[in-house]
Amino acid sequence: MVGYLLKRIGLMLLTLFIVISLTFFLMKLIPGSPFSAAAKLNETQRAIMAAKYGLDQPVPVQYLKYMTNVLQGDLGVSFQFSNTPVTELIAKRIGPSATLGLQAMIFGTIFGIILGVIAALRQNTWMDYGSTLVAVLGKSIPSFVFAAMLQYFIAVRLGWFPVAFWRGYEYSILPTIALAIFPISIAARFMRTEMIEVLSSDYIVLARAKGASSFEVAFKHALRNALIPVVTVLGPLAVSLITGSLVVERVFAIPGLGEQFVTSINVLDYPVIMGTTILFAALFIFVVLIVDILYSIIDPRIRLSGGEN
Amino acid sequence: MESILTVKDLAISFNTYAGEVKAIRGVNFELYKGETLAIVGESGSGKSVTTKSIMRLLPKSNSEMKPESQILFDGKDLTKQTDKQMEKIRGKDISMIFQDPMTSLNPTMKIGKQIAEPLLKHQNLSKAQAKARALELLKLVGIPNPEVRINQYPHQFSGGQRQRIVIAVALACNPKVLIADEPTTALDVTIQAQILDLMKDLQKKIDTSIIFITHDLGVVASVADRVAVMYGGRIVEVGTVDEIFYNPKHPYTWGLISSMPSLETDVDELFVIPGSPPDLLNPPKGDAFAARNRFAMAIDFEEEPPMFKVSETHYAATWLLHPDAPYVEPPEAVKKNQEKFNNAQSKGGVY
């Protein structure tokens, strides 16, 4: 297990290195410079700015310099927010995004799994159709429409929660629901399919032949087996939720990472683009590792030592 | 002989998009205490459906048991029990072994827990007692090193060992009836022999009655006391092993016996029963086997034959047994079997 983890961490660092390098060169391929938008600057001023941030040097030199800094934990300073370090910017912005993402993930998967299990156990009844309807709507309604509906009906008409902004816990409820609808529909659909398949397998018939009640059959025997494929889908989904949803953050005026990422690409704020990419990639790789460890906990047939048994 | 399970007029249909498939069309049989009754027949003849319906394990959503069906066990009609009542019978009084040991154990649950489950459910044992009993059962079915093995998962066992574990699960509560649905079909021949020996041995130890489903007549000869031959959702012939093997009366049983390769046969081609099983979506009017039966008479296509009595224990549903029917010679293979049997009898002793 320890050997396996070390090997995995080595691979994770390699992956991260490749992601950083690719992003760096791809980013340099975008036409324009960070200062081309500011019409007030003349040629000389632009050259001075470029020299100040080292952008006048050849791309390979910039790359080497950037990599050296990254290895020392320095992600550089932002161009758009007068010299604020990127780490500080991310640290300030990740709070709301992570809170929303985690809440949406926990609420979404648990609720989605329950919906899927109910649909599978009550196949072809109104409960199944209801759960399918929720899942299809959740996947097909764009999140900004859903967010706006939540704002109008629950915040404006009923007045249960604030419409927007980020000033306390109650401000996180509506955006969490808006974000959770996607994991709910994914989890519900996957869970239903897997559960139906597992419920028709031989060991479930044997469990029933032992005299297990339908509740025991569903939760002691079937659920764990049906969860295995669902975990695969939910892992990467978790990252995209934690790192923030641009649309939902915009609609609810929440100062999160997703919003900042898109702005920084628009104005070619190189250090922020790189910093956010590194964070997303690192999180993604980390979640994949967590998913693999979860696998081995759920499914005893998977051994992390890699076939030494 | 005391009967422990009586199946009367069992009729089951499956509702499919194509229409109503009449899988079981009036099955009657009795299971006596302590005996092994083999149910044989080709795929689709209704063997598994019959036994699954005894356990009430058929999916409720698309299967339908006709109201005249009766399954009498222990003074109760199982067709009339509620789901809760059935849960108390399953695994305790009647339990089941399935065909494929590779898929019939839960892959994510330790085998000790899987064996202990019916014990905890039906016998009010504490966890420690259930574990001790699970260890005992593992020893009983011949799993070496049970103290270690009890904490392992199914994938750590071979196919034969897994079937032993499934048998341990089935026998955990000393059931009165054990239904074995082709328990050796998925195993290779040496393991097959071991499992059959184990089952025979355990049957004596815990005094249970076994319904043994198979399509392997060799297996039947080695385990069964009586045999019921199923065809097209009905039992067409029933009798003791000797009666079915050495004095079969139904042309379908003749076909089965003739298809059995033996060590003495030295032929280039094995016998097959021509044609294919009847379409149970639209069951034929007369005898379901008539279309494949070279001895079929006009009446076979008109009217279903009743069960004719051959002896106290031997019945067959074929018009050939009607007093007005002409005499037909059974096929060569069947006659050879009969002669062998008669010779052995006259010498005193069957084998």
Image (spheres, rainbow, N blue to C red):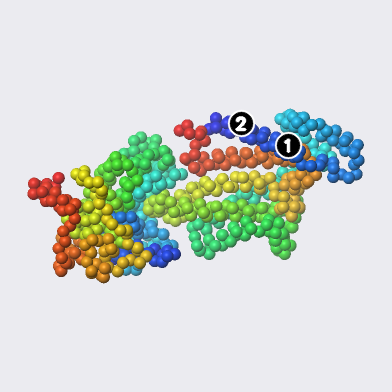
Amino acid at pointer 2: Gly
Which residue position holds label 1?
A25
Quadrant where the C terminus of chain B sits is top left
Q: Secondary structure at mark 1?
A: helix
Residue at image point 34% right, 57% down: B44
Residue found at the very far bottom of the displayed protein: B302
Q: Mark 1 Cα within 10 Å, few/some/many (few <14, many 20+)?
A: few
Q: Nearer the viewer, mark 2 or mark 1?
A: 1
Q: Is residue B313 visible?
A: no
Residue at image point 55% right, 56% down: A115
**Residue A99 left/right relative to B74:** right
Q: Position of residue A182 (x, y in %)?
A: 63, 53
Which residue position holds label 2?
A10
Of B205 and B296, nearer the camera is B296
Chain identifier of the residue bearing label 1 in the image: A
Of B10 and A218, nearer the camera is B10
Quadrant where the N terminus of chain B sits is bottom left
Alpha carbon distance from label 2 to label 1: 23 Å
Q: Position of residue A180 (x, y in %)?
A: 64, 53
